């Protein structure tokens, strides 16, 4: 700033190498004069703005209904061409468009309401002590009431009610999405794919197993027929139905039911650990113990799959098997108890 532009007192002191300003050298320009809007002067214009705001809120409600309708009616795999976006999922596009429109209309309605109908008179706020005095609190309440009156929240019932409607309906979009959590499991966790007469399939060859395929000292795995790793539900099914089969000399089997549920010493147990569900894969042929690699739970396959070590809560479920007319091993039904973690014993 050149010296000519400084206030006279400051310019004088600058000649002596020090700047001292006595008092406020600049006049407070104050707020510019308030210019009333068209809506402040013309009730017809105000009514028009009211209808625009209400229309935006109604549009928001319709968009929310469109969101729900899209979710219910459009198939997830349907692809459509939308210019200029290109090929997109019809469901994703419709959900994004309708939810975005619903939120945008609420915001646009609120902004238009504030810009055209709420009071736009600027009021300077004087600085106050931090602790509010009773008078200040009373002033705040008075200001709040004045703000409520100036916003015409009470008078413009159409706006108020449509805004409440729009804001109440938008969360419905979130509620509908809860459906993606899937159906309740029902009894599906208590049953597996095994049914009476199903042959035991070798997962490596995809061929049915014969008794002679099960050799003493080896651990053989099996699954129900008709399973393919390409199936959408393959992991769900195999996570419950995976079997391990061993051959034990009948006189070494201590549990009578185990002997009865097998075929000449061939016994089939669930491969899923009863601790937290890891697949069991380590077999000690001398002792007939199987070890879960996750937390070292150890089960005795010569004694009904009993837990002999580790955190597992109950014995491995056994599948009752026999040999069918074609000479293949087959299941005589599903497991008699739920497979997997001991959650069931707490229920
Ligand atoms: S999952 Fe098998 S011991 Fe923990």
Image: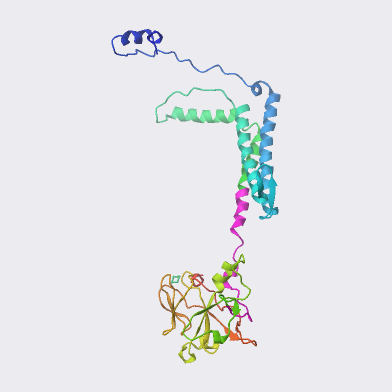
Residue 117 visible to the viewer: no
Q: Is residue 113 on the magenta stretch?
A: no
Examine the image and state in which quarter residue 149 appears: top right
Q: State left or right for residue 324 relative to residue 302.
A: right
Say if 183 sits above or below 96 in the image. below
Examine the image and state in which quarter residue 212 appears: bottom right
Examine the image and state in which quarter residue 2 appears: top left
Task: Give the x, y percent position of residue 328.
Answer: 61, 84
| Residue at the image position 42 percent from the left and 74 percent from the top | 297
Residue that extends furthest to the bottom in the rendered view of this protein = 251
Q: Where is ligand 1, by quadrant? A: bottom left
The residue closer to the viewer here, 11 or 188, is: 11
| Residue at the image position 45 percent from the left and 15 percent from the top | 28
The residue closer to the viewer here, 6 or 204, is: 204
| Residue at the image position 57 percent from the left and 69 percent from the top | 189
Task: Give the x, y percent position of residue 238.
Answer: 56, 71
**What stretch of residues is rendered in magenta?**
172-201
Residue 150 visible to the viewer: yes
Task: Give the x, y percent position of residue 65.
Answer: 68, 46
| Residue at the image position 64 percent from the left and 36 percent from the top | 160
Residue that extends furthest to the left in the rendered view of this protein = 16
Q: Is residue 194 on the magenta stretch?
A: yes
Quadrant, the N terminus: top left
């Amino acid at each position: 700033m050149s010296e000519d532009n400084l206030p006279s007192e400051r310019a004088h002191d600058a000649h002596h190498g020090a700047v001292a300003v006595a008092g406020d050298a600049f006049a407070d320009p104050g707020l510019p004069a308030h210019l009333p809007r068209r809506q402040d002067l013309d009730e017809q214009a105000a009514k028009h703005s009211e209808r625009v705001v209400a229309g935006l809120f109604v549009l928001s409600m319709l968009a929310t209904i469109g969101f729900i309708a899209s979710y219910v009616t459009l198939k997830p795999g349907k692809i459509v061409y939308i210019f200029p976006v290109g090929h997109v999922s019809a469901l994703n596009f419709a959900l994004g468009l309708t939810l975005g429109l619903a939120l945008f209309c609420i915001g646009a309605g609120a902004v238009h309401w504030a810009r055209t109908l709420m009071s736009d008179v600027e009021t300077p706020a004087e600085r106050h002590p931090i602790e509010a005095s009773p008078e200040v609190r009373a002033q705040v309440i008075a200001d709040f009431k004045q703000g409520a009156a100036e916003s015409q929240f009470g008078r413009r019932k159409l706006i108020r009610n449509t805004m409440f409607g729009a804001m109440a309906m938008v969360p419905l979009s979130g509620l509908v999405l809860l459906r993606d959590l899937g159906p309740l499991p029902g009894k599906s966790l208590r049953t597996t794919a095994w049914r009476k007469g199903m042959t035991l399939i070798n997962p490596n060859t995809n061929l049915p197993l014969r008794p002679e395929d099960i050799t003493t000292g080896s651990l053989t795995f099996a699954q129900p027929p008709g399973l393919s790793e390409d199936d959408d539900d393959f992991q769900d099914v195999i996570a419950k139905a995976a079997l391990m089969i061993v051959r034990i000399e009948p006189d070494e089997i201590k549990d009578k039911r185990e002997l009865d549920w097998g075929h000449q010493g061939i016994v089939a147990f669930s491969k899923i650990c009863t601790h937290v569900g890891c697949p069991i894969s380590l077999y000690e042929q001398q002792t007939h113990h199987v070890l879960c690699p996750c937390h070292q739970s150890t089960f005795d396959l010569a004694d009904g799959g009993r837990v002999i070590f580790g955190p597992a809560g109950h014995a491995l479920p056994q599948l009752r098997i026999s040999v069918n007319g074609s000479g293949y091993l087959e299941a005589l039904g599903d497991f008699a108890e739920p497979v997997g973690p001991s959650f069931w014993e707490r229920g």
